[in-house]
């Protein structure tokens, strides 16, 4: 892996772990933020060459971390540019900092 990929993977793991371990009382607001980040990351994956199209389904709050993890791994599997990794990592940092 390159530095961009490593940084992205680390940040994805941090955010996903935080969402998965979040108390139910704070999960609804956090899941909404994670869903918006997931949609943006999916758009980046599509721009990087993922042939997937369509709308991202809004799944249960308890699965927000899993949804983000799947989309993040799909994004990384496309071997995006260094600039795309930086943008995606910044998105995840922003999400992590906005979580209660």
Image: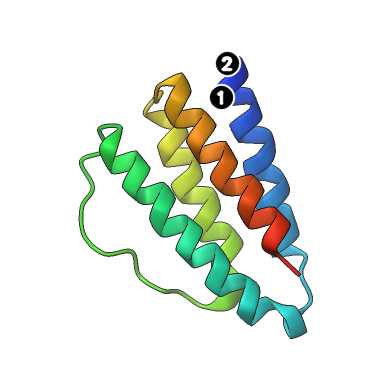
Name the residue beneath numbered marker 1.
5
Task: Identify whether 94 is placed above or below 20.
Answer: above
> In percent of the image, x 55 and y 50: which residue is there?
69
**Residue 33 placement (x, y as % from top left):** 56, 67
**Above or below: residue 51 compared with residue 33:** above
Query: Which residue lies most toward the bottom here?
Result: 25
Q: Quadrant of residue 24?
A: bottom right
Q: Residue at 39% x, 25% y: name it.
A: 80
* Dots 2, 1 in contact, CB < 8 A: yes
Mark 1, secondary structure of its residue: helix
The residue under label 2 is 1
The location of residue 21, given as percent across then percent down, is 77, 64
Where does residue 77 sit, x and y in percent of width and height?
A: 42, 30
Spatial CA distance of label 2 from label 1 is 6 Å
Using a 10 Å C-alpha cutoff, classify the residue at mark 1 as few (fewer than 14 neighbours), some (14 to 19) or many (20 or more): many
Mark 2: which secondary structure? loop
Question: Which image quarter is the C terminus in?
Answer: bottom right
- Please report the residue visible at 54 percent of the width from the left and 73 percent of the height from the top: 32
């Amino acid at each position: 892996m390159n530095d961009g990929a490593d940084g992205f993977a680390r940040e994805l793991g941090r955010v996903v772990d935080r969402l998965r371990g979040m108390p139910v009382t704070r999960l609804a607001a956090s899941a909404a933020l994670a869903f918006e980040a997931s949609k943006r990351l999916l758009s980046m994956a599509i721009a990087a060459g993922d042939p997937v199209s369509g709308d991202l389904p809004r799944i249960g709050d308890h699965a927000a971390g899993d949804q983000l993890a799947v989309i993040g791994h799909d994004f990384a599997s496309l071997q995006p540019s260094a600039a795309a990794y930086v943008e995606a990592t910044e998105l995840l940092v922003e999400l992590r900092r906005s979580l209660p």
